[in-house]
Amino acid sequence: MAAPIARAGFSELLKPDLHQVYIDTGAENPTEFDMIVNVIDMPYNPLTDQQISGLGTMPVKDEGDPFAVDEPIMGGTTEYLAVPYGLSIEFTFEAWDDELYGVFNEMVAELSRASNNRLEVDAHAPLNFAESTAFTGFDGMPLIDTAHPVLGGGTPIANRPSVDINFSRTAVQVAMQAFHDLVDERGLPRLLAPVMALVTSAFYHDAREILGSSGRPLTANNELNALIPEDLSWMVSHYITNPNKWFIMSRQDVHDVNFYIRNDPDFDMFDDPRTLNAVGTMYQRHVSGFGTWRGIYGSTGA
């Protein structure tokens, strides 16, 4: 356990001879995760989601024959168990009382920045591990895969290119076709409209050229860009750790990548009665994951 911040370690801040103190923090960044995943209050812990299919297509009913009987198929489950996170900072009474430049107040504010970063990292985890069994859905498969099984049987479905490719015009076209060809667990068309391309800074210029230009990108002529009528927006994520990874996603309340919050970030500041030390704490509890992969198409890049 770290010792409290004392006068000896920050003696420069106790003397009135500094013109300016530069604190390497900067302005607070707006959160990104709440524009990407579903943020849901967790009513109890743990929480389990259950998959169940719909009905199949209607068969022929010959004259005088009884109705065919169908029933839904029970699928898998996904369990969410909230993980607690916490951080504190402590100052001796003497150090807090004698510090002259407001640096220690700024260090207390750093608890909020640390909290927001943990929210981002945890909420982005299903995307960062999208190709890994670190997170699996109802079908026991990663978020993006080339062979998701279908409850009603039939050909497995891919929401990842058979050969991973970087974000490009071709990548968007492949993803769009996959959305158009999507079927549900009984083989019926499942019409989910993609609305956003999520990329890293490595593909910032590509996304801007491909999805922001009315002309076909990277060509000498002025041919119409066929992707613009799809009205895909795009966003750069600063928390995707693989620079080559990208996703095409449906609307937040349509896809099933979830961030469950059991306890919102809770800040407290108090004086320890045994020492008079000033103590700041931040606590939060949350978990991320997904049930169904439908609504997400992505790749780890080339």
Image (tube, rainbow, N blue to C red):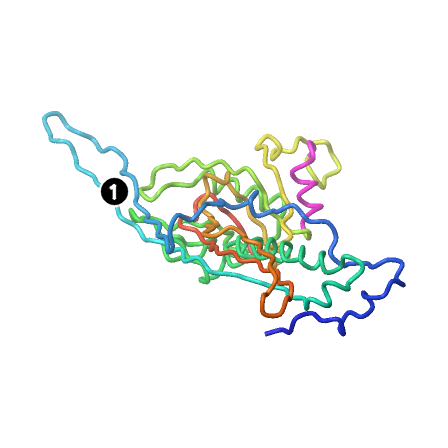
133 or 264: nearer the viewer: 264
Circle 1: element type: loop
Q: Which residue is mark 1?
A: 72
For the N terminus, the image quarter is bottom right
For the C terminus, the image quarter is bottom right
Q: Is residue 211 magenta?
A: yes
Q: Residues within 10 Å of mark 1 (few under 14, many from 20)?
A: some
x, y percentage for residue 283? 53, 58
Corner quadrant of residue 119: bottom right
x, y percentage for residue 29? 68, 48
86 or 236: nearer the viewer: 86
SS assignment for the magenta stretch, majority: helix
x, y percentage for residue 52? 30, 45
Residue 191 against residue 299 in the figure, above or below: above
Which residue appears farthest toward the top when viewing the image?
A: 63
**Is residue 301 rendered to the left or right of residue 145?**
right
x, y percentage for residue 212? 68, 36
Q: Is residue 245 magenta?
A: no
Corner quadrant of residue 243: bottom right
Residue segment shown in magenta: 203-215
Q: Residue at x 45, y 39 (%)?
A: 254
Q: Residue at x 44, y 50 (%)?
A: 158
**Is residue 261 rendered to the left or right of residue 108?**
left
3 or 176: nearer the viewer: 3
What type is the residue that disc 1 sits on? Pro
Residue 181 against residue 62 in the figure, above or below: below
